[in-house]
Image (cartoon, rainbow, N blue to C red):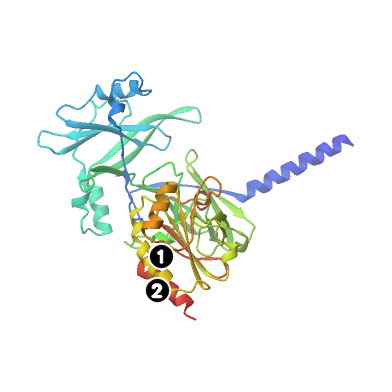
């Protein structure tokens, strides 16, 4: 009898494993150079503070930085060091400074040997000047003609030493006196007759995913931001819903998970889905707020931070909209994250914000639930509690709300 029980348990385990594996879909990716149908994005390059290049024995990274500083390119002044993080967390170092004519020059450790003596100094494109009044296609063409750095380094994949190579585009933003970069590549795959592309121009580890379906008649146009899907969101293909799990950089695959649940039982930050529920304390009154309690009203969720200029600039528009609308029909909920408690209080008082505010903290973790990566991020929720719009601001938001509640 005991052996039969063991056999039954083993059989159930195998069936469950097979069922789980059938729900996982892995799609092989093909890397494409350039930005393709997407608007390119740029990230700021990390710069060392002075202490990193000092010879202090208390500096835990002293050995690395001494090697870098001992191979400094000749003829540069006001030198600083920095790095670009590669897909496997290996840092590619660079040094920049001014030549005798005061022009910014840059050298990148392209073969990752911590030695700049075998690397070439070049003048990065000045983004503030070169990109001014340019169309998307003109910018793409300009990037292709500019100095793109080819990076190569040795790493381990499946216990084998392999060489990895990719390109980095680097520009200098003279307006803000900073270096910026991106990786001009994206990846494509096919699934059930659909052309799919993914990209993250500032991080090839794909910890964050931007996914889009490629139309057949896109021509030279760029895909709109509202047509992107992100990691942990859902896509629908042939009436089947799949969750975007990850990009497996070792296998070079896009991993999806089939779900058997209907859209009405799924939570997401996508239009057409229910947003993630929360139950949290209002910042000033300390009363509890939940999304469920707001059903029957249109709700505008405004994720903001104390250091976000565009967020603060939107306050006057929101104040005007709030004064024009009926609380029985429309509510604004501000959700402040990655900020100090005192800083949020000061801004609420200074701008006389009267709509409810929630401070996202380690208890409610609303920022984490919604996977907020940038500010401002906003969602408009309808009377049934479903997301109907994202990233509305200013006059566009006001027009939308007033039309919805006019009846």
| Residue 137, placed above or below residue 65 | below
| Residue 80, placed above or below residue 21 | above
Residue farthest to the bottom, as pictured: 407
Can residue 116 be seen by looking at this rendering? yes
Residue located at (64% from left, 49% from top): 22
Q: Is label 1 in a helix, a strand or a loop? A: loop
Quarter holding residue 224: bottom left
Badge 2: few (under 14), some or many (20 or more) residues near its Cα, within 10 Å?
A: few
Q: Name the residue under label 1.
A: 392
Q: Give left or right: position of 210 versus 11.
A: left
| Residue 86, placed above or below residue 329 | above
Quarter holding residue 12: top right
Q: Give left or right: position of 287 versus 3.
A: left
Residue 343 lies, in percent from the top left, at 40, 49
Residue 277 lies, in percent from the top left, at 58, 57
Q: How far apart are marks 2 and 1 (CA)?
A: 10 Å
Badge 1: few (under 14), some or many (20 or more) residues near its Cα, within 10 Å?
A: some
Q: Name the residue under label 2.
A: 399
Residue located at (82% from left, 36% from top): 6
| Residue 153, placed above or below residue 203 | above
Can residue 338 be seen by looking at this rendering? no
Question: Depth check: 284 or 358 in front?
Answer: 284
Residue located at (43% from left, 69% from top): 322
Residue farthest to the top, as pictured: 57
Question: Depth check: 81 or 155 in front?
Answer: 81
Q: Give left or right: position of 229 versus 256.
A: left
Residue 380 lies, in percent from the top left, at 48, 65
Q: Is label 2 in a helix, a strand or a loop? A: helix
Residue located at (37% from left, 60% from top): 351
């Amino acid at each position: 009898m005991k052996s039969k029980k063991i056999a039954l348990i083993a059989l159930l385990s195998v069936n469950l494993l097979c069922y789980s594996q059938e729900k996982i879909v892995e799609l092989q990716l093909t890397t494409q150079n350039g930005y393709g149908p997407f608007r390119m994005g740029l990230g700021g390059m990390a710069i060392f503070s002075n202490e990193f290049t000092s010879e202090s024995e208390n500096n835990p990274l002293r050995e690395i930085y001494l090697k870098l500083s001992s191979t400094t390119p000749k003829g540069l002044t006001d030198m600083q060091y920095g790095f670009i993080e590669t897909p496997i967390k290996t840092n590619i170092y660079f040094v920049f400074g001014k030549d005798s004519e005061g022009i910014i020059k840059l050298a990148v450790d392209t073969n990752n040997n911590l030695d700049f003596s075998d690397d070439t100094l070049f003048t990065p494109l000045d983004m503030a000047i070169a990109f001014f009044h340019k169309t998307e296609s003109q910018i793409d063409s300009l990037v292709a003609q500019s100095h793109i750095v080819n990076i190569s380094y040795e790493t381990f994949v499946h216990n084998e030493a392999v060489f990895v190579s990719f390109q980095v585009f680097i520009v200098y933003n003279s307006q803000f006196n900073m270096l910026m970069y991106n990786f001009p590549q994206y990846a494509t795959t096919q699934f059930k007759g659909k052309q799919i592309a993914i990209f993250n121009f500032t991080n090839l580890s794909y910890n964050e995913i931007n996914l889009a379906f490629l139309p057949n008649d896109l021509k030279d146009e760029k895909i709109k931001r509202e047509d992107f899907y992100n990691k942990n969101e859902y896509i629908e293909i042939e009436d089947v819903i799949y969750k975007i799990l990850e990009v497996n950089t070792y296998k070079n695959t896009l991993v999806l998970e089939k779900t058997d649940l209907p859209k009405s039982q799924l939570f997401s930050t996508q239009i057409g889905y229910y947003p993630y529920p929360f139950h949290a304390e209002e910042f000033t009154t300390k009363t509890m707020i939940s999304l469920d309690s707001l059903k029957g009203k249109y709700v505008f969720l405004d994720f903001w931070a104390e250091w976000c200029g565009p967020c603060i600039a939107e306050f006057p528009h929101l104040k005007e909209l709030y004064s024009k609308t009926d609380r029985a029909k429309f509510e604004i909920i501000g959700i402040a994250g990655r900020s100090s408690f005192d800083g949020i209080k000061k801004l609420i008082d200074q701008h006389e914000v009267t709509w409810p505010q929630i401070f996202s903290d380690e208890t409610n973790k609303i920022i984490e639930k919604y996977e907020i990566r940038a500010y401002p991020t906003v969602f408009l929720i309808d009377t049934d509690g479903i997301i109907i719009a994202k990233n509305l601001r200013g006059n566009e938001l006001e027009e939308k709300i007033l039309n919805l509640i006019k009846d």
